[in-house]
Amino acid sequence: KINQDRGVVHHPFNGSQNEALFCVFDGHGSGGEKVAEYCMRKIPTALQEKGDLRASTEATLEKAVCDVDRSVLRKAEGRFALMCGCTSIIVYLQGRTLWTACSGDSRAVLGYSSKGSIRARDLSEDCKPDDPKEKKRIEKCGGVVSGGGRPGVPARVWANGAVGLAMSRSIGDGEVKKFGVICDPKIRKFEITPAPANDKKADGDRFIIVASDGVWEFIDSQEACDIV
C-alpha cells in the first residue's frame, strides 16, 4: 500500500530565523498521496505569497489553504482530486506566538511540564462529521452523517450514498464539496512559554507533536506525550 502521508518542516521560514513552519498532510482515496504531495510543495510557498503572514496571520493561513484547494480542484480539469484528497495541519511559529490551521483529523499537540509531570494540550481541533456544528452544515447541504460516538466506528460523510469521508474538512475531495465538506481551516492561536532547557524539572512548554491519524487513531494526545 502506498504511504499517503506527507510532512514538511521549514526553519528559518518567511526570511526569518525567528519563524518556523511544520505541516502534515494525510492523503486518502485513490491518488490521495498526490494531493498530499501537492500541498506539501505548494502551501509553504503560498503562505509567503498570499498576503502578509506576520501582520495578518489568520487571514493569510485561510487564504493559502483555500487557494491551494481551488488549485487542486482545477488540476487536470477537475479529475485530479474528484474522489481523493488530504487532511492539512499547519503549525506556524513566530517567536513565542503559535498558530495552528486544521482541515481534517491530523493534529498538533503541545507537551508541557507541570509539577514534575508531562501533560498534553491539543493545539488543534479535529474536524469530525459528528461535531454538532459540522454535522449541521453537512446536512444542510444534503450530505448524510453516519457512525461516531463508539470506539472504532468513525463518523463519515456520505454523498448520494457514496464516498464515506471520515472528516468534515479537507483539501480536494471534489465529489463531496457540494455536500458541506469544506477546506476552510479551523485556526487557533497560542502563546508558548518554553521550559528552561537545562532544567528537566521546571514547568513550561517542552515539545510539539504534529501527526496524522495514523497516530491519533490508536493513541490519545496524553499517551503520545508520555512516549515522547
Image: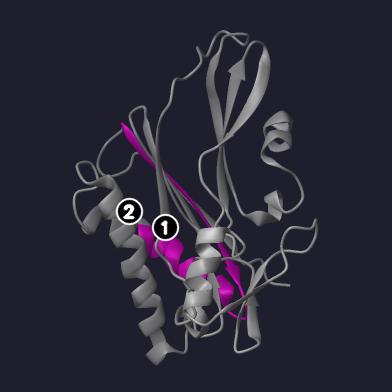
Say which amino acid is labelled 1.
Answer: Pro
**Mark 2–mark 1 contact, CB under 8 Å?**
yes
Quadrant for residue 182, please give it.
bottom left
Quadrant that contains the C terminus: top right
Is the residue marked by circle 1 packed among few (<14), some (14-19), or many (20+) residues within 10 Å?
Answer: many
**Mark 2: which secondary structure?**
helix
**Which residue was labeled with disc 2?**
61
Quadrant that contains the N terminus: bottom right
Query: Residue 137 in magenta?
Result: no
Say which amino acid is labelled 2.
Answer: Leu
Give the magenta range.
18-43
- Any part of residue 208 in sight: yes
Instruction: Name the residue rendered at 50%, 12% in the picture.
Output: 196
Q: Number of labelled discs?
A: 2
- Of label 2 and label 1, which has the lower sequence position? 2
Quadrant for residue 166, please give it.
bottom right
Residue 80, disc: none
Is the residue marked by circle 2 packed among few (<14), some (14-19), or many (20+) residues within 10 Å?
Answer: many
> Is 206 located above or below residue 65 in the figure?
above
Query: Residue 31 in magenta?
Result: yes
**Mark 1: which secondary structure?**
loop
Measured Cα–Cα span from mark 2 to mark 1:
8 Å
Instruction: Name the residue rendered at 74%, 58% in the picture.
Output: 149
**Which residue was labeled with disc 1?**
185
Instruction: Name the residue rendered at 68%, 17% in the picture.
Output: 117
Instruction: Name the residue rendered at 55%, 80% in the picture.
Output: 143
Q: Position of residue 225 (x, y in %)?
A: 67, 32
